[in-house]
Image (spheres, rainbow, N blue to C red):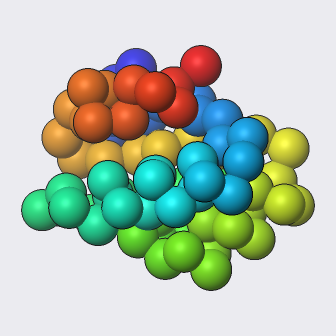
Amino acid sequence: MICNNKYLYKIELVTAADVLEFVRIATKCGYPVTLVNGNRRLNAKSILGVSMARASWDEMYVETDFNCYFEFEKFIR
């Protein structure tokens, strides 16, 4: 989904292994990758941040300036 010239996809990270793989993929991206939940935003390249978001947020979205569907398609719901 495109929103304000940014790509936004709802994601689900079920396990700790999902968090590790998601961060590994985000880190390889040559552009900013952000996790979003309402007004809360954090760097998706931070394993600590993504782990805490997984534990406390009811839903998560990945936001980028470029289409990241194929990089994160395993996690997109």
Is residue 18 found left or right of 52 in the rendered image? left
Is 27 rendered above or below residue 63? below
Q: Residue 17, can we see it? A: yes
Q: Would you identify the image quadrant in which residue 32 lies?
A: bottom left
Residue under the point 54% across and 74% down: 47
| Residue 30, position as x, y percentages in the image | 12, 62
In the drawing, does residue 8 fall left or right of residue 28? right
- Residue that lies at the very extreme toward the left in this rendered image: 30
- On screen, 61 above or below 10? below
Q: Residue at x 85, y 44 (%)?
A: 58
Residue found at the very far front of the displayed protein: 17
**x then y, percent, for residue 63:** 41, 46
Instruction: Give x and y (percent) for residue 75.
Output: 52, 32
Q: Is residue 51 above or below residue 15?
A: below
**Which quarter of the rendering shows the C terminus?**
top right
Query: Is residue 40 at all visible to an observer of this figure?
Result: no
Residue 48: quarter of image: bottom right
Tell me which residue sits at (66%, 35%) in the image: 12
Q: Is residue 37 above or below residue 41?
A: above
Decide if residue 20 is on the left or right side of residue 40.
Answer: left
| Quadrant (top left, top right, bottom left, bottom right) of the N terminus | top left
| Nearest to the observer: residue 14 or residue 63 | 14
Q: Quadrant of residue 24?
A: bottom left
How many numbered discs, if any?
0
Q: With 54 as the anchor, is 3 left or right in this view?
A: left
Residue 18 position, x and y percent, is 58, 48
Q: Nearer the viewer, residue 17 or 23?
A: 17
Q: Residue at x 38, y 35 (%)?
A: 72
